[in-house]
Image (tube, rainbow, N blue to C red):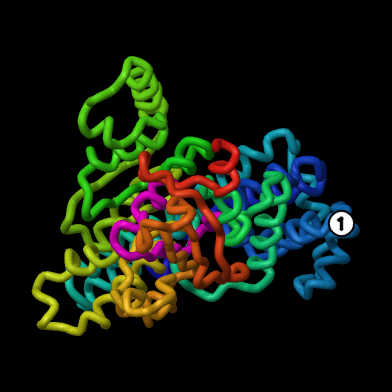
Amino acid sequence: MDELLGRKTPHSAPAEQAVVGSMLIDPRCVPEVLERLRGDEFYIKLNRDLYETMYAMFSYGQTIDPVTVLDQMKVRGVYQEGCESILAEIMRVTPTAANVLEYAAIVRDQALMRRLAETADEINGMVYEGSGEAESMLEAAERKIYALRQGRNVGGLLPISSVVQNVFDNLSEAAASGSRIPGLSTGLPDLDQRILGLNKSDLILVAARPGMGKTSIALNFALHVALAQKKTVAIFSLEMSREQLVTRLLSRASLVPLQNLLTGQLTEQQWQSVTEAAQTISGTDIRIDDNPTLTVADMNAQCRRVPDLGLVVIDYLQLLQSAGSGHSWSNESRTQAVSDISRMMKIMAKELNVPVVCASQLSRANESRSDKRPMLSDLRESGAIEQDADVVIGLYREGYYNKESENPNLAEAIVLKNRKGSTGTVELAWLPEYTSFASAERRRDDE
């Protein structure tokens, strides 16, 4: 089509040849190039085949030189007649491997222009076909542009070889980090070991009855990710105001009882602790939106504009549902509405490629049982939420129901669903004075 219209598809044959030539001349530059380029960013098929062959060889620890590369091209079924002479010519015209990163930048820039042109054509087609309302088209267009900015494609069949390379990249990243868990830490080591941390593209549901601490544990996660792991955290609070949330965070960070912060009855030492905590929290990149009428689409649109986003926290699901509907629940199926919301949250987690933690209320079903520990079936309109969530954590405190309990501040994080491992119970310590949680071991050590 471009040729018919007299348009030249953006690409740079010399830059592509210079990249693969540099990798053949000096294999020491291979790791740096692999960090910056993907195989599908090469426009000319032979250059793409050469690059992907060397990518695979490097991933599997094989020696890279003209002879071994040609042999592997035969193994991979991408060898063409005359490859030897083409390889020799590429190496001859490549001036030096010293400038390989500049060549790689040109290849990447041209690839981005090609994808931008394709996306513009898709958006044009969508508009002129009249498929849907303007608002939904705008949402689809934003999603496509965001994917370009993140260096990803929206949908499309991907060869398994590319997926294998992605898995190897993730393995290398995990090995280099030295962490025992692949995801972000929650700040609660026992819970981390059970769910393997907060992982990219996961929807993590924290479910509990009112007053059990679901907001508190979600804020625990947010504060730890922002403080200890220096990630940007987006918090959407449909119940509490920004000031209420930050007061809770200050109480947790300063270890000054929340009641004292609310009443202003602080000792000199407590004032100092709160001031230091305020400075620490101000140095993090936590962003809070307390608009009670937010929809998932609103949150997704805001998050797309946040650089280096690490975690999204939503408090809480049931309020989001009613906010997302323009009319009363009697006019439509509540179950269908919850199904749509939970699906959209999972799509948001995948699209943003960050963990999304969402608090959710349990139904009253557990109140009528002798064992009041939460079950998956206690989730309100639970079918869809169970299906979409990767991890479901139910909170339970015996002291909430039994004031005479032997250990009223013992809490249980019951992992009811876990796509990455086993389910089971993790003991935590409830710190009522700070409306926060800590690991059970730490509480015992403090005592």
Quarter-of-image position of residue 426: bottom right
Residue at image location 28% in from the left, 56% down from the top: 299
Quadrant of the drawing holding the N terminus:
bottom left
Q: Which residue is mark 1?
A: 62
Residue at image location 63% in from the left, 59% down from the top: 39
Quadrant of the drawing holding the C terminus:
top right
Task: Kindly state the secondary structure of the residue where label 1 is placed.
Answer: loop
Quarter-of-image position of residue 7: bottom left
Q: Residue 217: x percent and y percent?
A: 41, 51
What's the magenta region?
197-221
Residue at image location 51% in from the left, 49% down from the top: 186
Whether residue 147 sits left or right of residue 107 in the image: it is left
Can residue 26 be seen here? yes
Residue sitting farthest toward the front: 404
Please tell me whether residue 271 is drawn above or below residue 427 in the rendered image: above
Q: Residue 146: x percent and y percent?
A: 38, 56
Given residues 420 and 27, the one toward you in this image is: 420
Amino acid at the residue labelled 1: Gln
